[in-house]
């Protein structure tokens, strides 16, 4: 039987769509649900278009025993994937699903992590500090922003004339290539 993936996302959902499509061709797992903290998030449309159940929730439901946690207990995911999910993930869920929640961060942690460091804020900081490389970090989620154990990092070299937009493009390329593969490796018990 295929393993079950639940994706949490807050925005447009390009990473979520990429993951769903990847696992539609996989023998290992499938995405069974997409959840968002924003009822108008484009990720919900993307998921439904790809025949994956999708729903939004309120902040109260995220923190409640009878909200998101209840849904997750019914769905029984083997892994929970945060793909552009911008809220702090609640301990109530982390306790119920220990070492089963992973996140992707658009930089090489521990650099450029923490509260408020996401998307363009990360890329702007990378450019401002004249970094010669950046990349992605896929890590387990714990009770602190971007501090869980690192599963995998992939790097990309930067040139002197990068802009936040060119950095974002390079990082997105890494995300699309590696995030689904690393999820599959984690589910198979052999992350690289």
Image (spheres, helix red, strand yellow):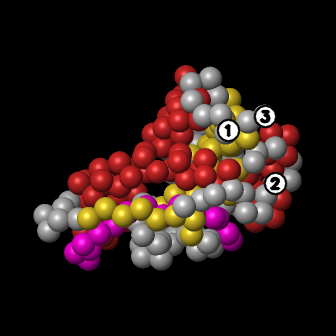
First along the sequence among labels 2 and 3: 3
Q: Secondary structure at mark 2?
A: loop
2 and 3 marks in contact (CB < 8 Å): no
Residue 54 magenta-drawn? Answer: no
Q: Earlier in the sequence, mark 2 or mark 1?
A: 1
Secondary structure at badge 3 equals loop
**Residue sitting at x 63%, y 44%:** 7
Side of 95 relative to 141 (left or right): right
The reply to whether residue 13 is in sight is no
Q: Nearer the viewer, residue 101 or 59?
A: 101
Residue 1 badge: 3
Circles 3 and 1, Cβ within 8 Å, touching? The answer is: no
**What numbered label is drawn on residue 64?**
2
What residue is pinned by disc 1?
29
Q: Which segment did they paint magenta? A: 129-143
Q: Of tags 2 and 3, which is closer to the observer?
A: 3
**Image quadrant of residue 49?**
top right
Residue 134: x %, y % from top left? 34, 67
Q: Please report the residue visible at 81 percent of the width from the left and 44 percent of the height from the top.
A: 76
Pointer 2: residues within 10 angstroms few (<14), some, or many (20+)?
some
Label whose residue precedes the other's in the sequence (3 or 1)? 3
**C-alpha gap between disc 3 and disc 1:** 8 Å
């Amino acid at each position: 039987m295929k393993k079950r993936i639940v994706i949490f996302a807050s925005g447009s959902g390009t990473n979520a769509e990429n993951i769903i499509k990847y696992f539609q061709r996989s023998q290992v797992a499938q995405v069974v649900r997409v959840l968002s903290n924003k009822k108008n998030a484009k990720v919900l449309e993307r998921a439904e278009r790809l025949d994956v159940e999708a729903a939004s929730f309120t902040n109260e439901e995220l923190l409640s025993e009878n909200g998101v946690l209840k849904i997750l207990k019914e769905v029984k995911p083997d892994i929970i994937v945060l793909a552009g999910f911008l809220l702090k993930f609640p301990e109530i869920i982390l306790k119920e699903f220990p070492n089963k929640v992973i996140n992707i961060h658009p930089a090489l942690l521990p650099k450029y992590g923490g509260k408020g460091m996401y998307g363009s804020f990360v890329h702007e900081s990378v450019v401002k500090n004249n970094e010669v490389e950046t990349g992605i970090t896929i890590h387990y989620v714990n009770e602190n922003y971007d501090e869980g154990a690192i599963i995998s990092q992939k790097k990309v070299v930067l040139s002197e004339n990068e802009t936040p937009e060119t950095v974002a493009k390079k990082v997105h390329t890494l995300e699309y290539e590696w995030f689904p593969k690393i999820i599959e490796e984690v589910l198979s018990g052999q992350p690289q």
